Image (tube, rainbow, N blue to C red):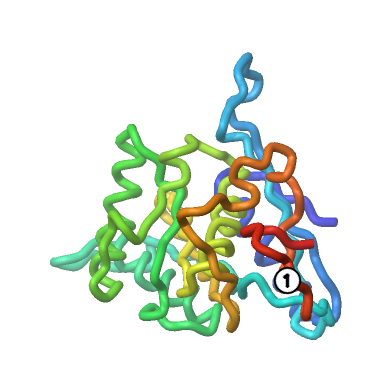
Amino acid sequence: MRLTQGGANAGFTSLNAALDYLQAHPQESVWVMNWDAPDFPSKEAKINENLVVLFLAGPELKTEREPLAWIGRAATGNVNDYERKAGTTRVIQAWKATIEAAAKNAGRSIADIQYTIHDAGKGSDTASERLAGLSRTLTETMLEFDYAKQTFNTAGLLGDMGAGSALTNVALAIARANHLGGSVLVAGTTNSEHPTAVVVAPPAKLTPIDPDKDWFRARGENNAYLPWWGRRHGENYGTAQGYSW
């Protein structure tokens, strides 16, 4: 067992430790977890209290299941590695290099990235600064990029998730890649000098989804806490979207 304490980027550290272990032990599996309740103690239930567990399988482990997605190592940049230049900023330069490295870690190119999930938040000067650097980078880097349609600001919806942030966003990226295809960028914006990014790539076989019908876990109360497994080979799962065992 390895424990990592920290803020929003702690989950990226745990993820890399897990992927390093699987590289050395390709026939084994690792559980990676992050959780936090930043507003505790509070008299009210908060939607920014998150716990996520990823069950990661080594590349040689015989799971007898379809993969949900493929996850690359997290890449971290350093703003201080770059010189000031006309027409750009050190933050933009660091973000571009970080995204390129994350895509390479996942065996993909920047052109493969079709969606971005991030933790910039909203409603503060700090959030605005985070959004400014990331949004400009994405606009300059991605082909025909539509920021409104191709990004999701999780912290902007749920609030600051603290150490529960990184893997929550990775889990969302896995879901999108598995159902809709295209690689997904997970951007960690909370450290102003060290942008962090992970690229999640889709499986060869997508799991179709009808956006006009309920997803199994969306309104399932206790069902929301059931593990979401890759589908077993040769199994018929019926019509319940997102249901697997």
Question: Left or right: where does residue 154 sit relative to residue 46?
Answer: left
Q: Which residue is mark 1?
A: 231
Q: Position of residue 63 (x, y in %)?
A: 82, 77
Label 1: state its secondary structure: loop
Where residue 133 sits in the image (x, y, percent)?
A: 30, 55
Quarter holding residue 140: bottom left
**Residue occupying image coordinates x 40% and y 65%:** 115
Does residue 148 appear left or right of residue 109 in this picture?
left
Number of on-image labels: 1
Observer-nearest residue: 13 or 123?
A: 123
Amino acid type, residue under disc 1 in the picture: Arg
Q: Quadrant of residue 232?
A: bottom right
Residue 60 against residue 89 in the figure, above or below? below
Give the x, y percent position of residue 27: 85, 81
Choose between 74 and 138: the one closer to the eye: 138
Q: Residue at x 58, y 52 (%)?
A: 215
